[in-house]
Image: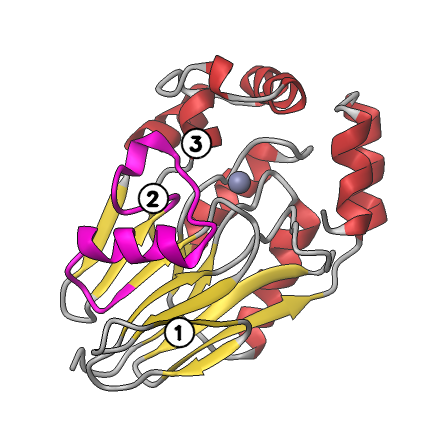
Amino acid sequence: MGGSFKYAVISDVHSNLEALRAVLNDIEKEKIKKVLFIGDVVGYGPDPVKCIELIRKRCIYSVAGNHDWAVIGYTPSDYFNYNARVAIEWTKEQLAEDDFKFLRSLSIVKVLEKEGVFLVHASPKEPDAWNYILSLYDAEINFQYFKERICLIGHSHVPFIIETLPSGEIVLHREEIEFKESCRYIINVGSVGQPRDGNPDAAYAIINDKYARIIRVRYDIEKTQKKMEKAGLPEFLIERLSKGI
Ligand code: ZN
C-alpha cells in the first residue's frame, strides 16, 4: 500500500531560525530530499521573514497553522493568549507583502493521494477550529475524519505516534514505529521552534513507507533567546525555550 516514499516532516517553526537551520541541516545529513511543512512558520520567535523564506525554498508541500492564519487575519486574535497576541502583532510589523502573500497561499489540508498521507496542522475533524488532539479518545474520533492511512499533525508541540489496530484498539507510541499492514496512524511530529514536551531540542519526523521516527536536534537556544530579547518579545516566551515547556 502507498508505494515507496520518504519524507522529512516539520511543524511549528515559530520564527526560530536557529532551530529551523539545525533541523534542515540534519535532514540534509540524512539525505532526505522531500520536506513537508504542517504549519505555524511564524509566531513567538524573532525571525519570521527568514523562516518564511527557508520554508518556501525547502518544503514541497505546506499547510497553514493557527499563527499563520492569525497574522493574515483569518483567525481572530482573541483566540490567542496575551503573549501569543503580542508576538503576532510584532510579526505583522516585520513582514513584507510577499510574505503575507505566501501565508495566504497556504491551504488548510493537503492530501498525498499516492502515499495515503493526510496533512493538517491541528485536527482532521475541524481543521480551522484548531482543536488539539491530546488523548487517545480525541484521536479515535479524528480517525473517522480522514480516509488515508497516515495523518500528520503538529499544533500541540508534543510529538507522538498513535496507531489504530484493525480491532479498533488504539495504541500510543512515543518515538518510533514500524508501520503494519491494515493499521492507521496519527503522528504528531512535534515542534521545530518551541518544543513543549520537556525536551528543549528541536523536533521533526522522518516518515517512509515502512516506518516513522521522531528525531531531536540540538540548536543554539541562547542565540534565539538573545534575538527575542532584542526584539522586545515577551519574557515568558524567551524562557520557555530553554526548558522545552
Ligand atoms: Zn504552534
Tell me if the residue at label 3 has its CB under 8 Å from ligand 1: yes
Q: Which residue is mark 1?
A: 207
Place of residue 151 in the rendered image (x, y in percent of width and height, measured from the top left):
30, 60
Crowding near the residue tagged with mark 3, few <14, some 14–19, many ≥20 C-alpha atoms within 10 Å = many
Name the mark nearer the viewer: 3 or 2.
Answer: 3
Residue 230 or residue 186, whichever sits in front: 186
Q: Which residue is mark 2?
A: 63
- Name which of mark 2 and mark 1 comes first in the sequence: 2
Residue 138 or residue 37, whichever sits in front: 138
Q: Which residue is mark 3?
A: 66
- In the rendered image of this protein, does residue 138 appear above or below residue 147? above
Magenta segment: 121-150
Place of residue 34 in the rendered image (x, y in percent of width and height, measured from the top left):
37, 67
Q: Secondary structure at mark 1?
A: strand
Place of residue 220 in the rendered image (x, y in percent of width and height, measured from the top left):
80, 54
- Name which of mark 3 and mark 1 comes first in the sequence: 3
Q: Is residue 142 magenta?
A: yes
Alpha-carbon distance for marks 3 and 1?
24 Å
Crowding near the residue tagged with mark 2, few <14, some 14–19, many ≥20 C-alpha atoms within 10 Å = many
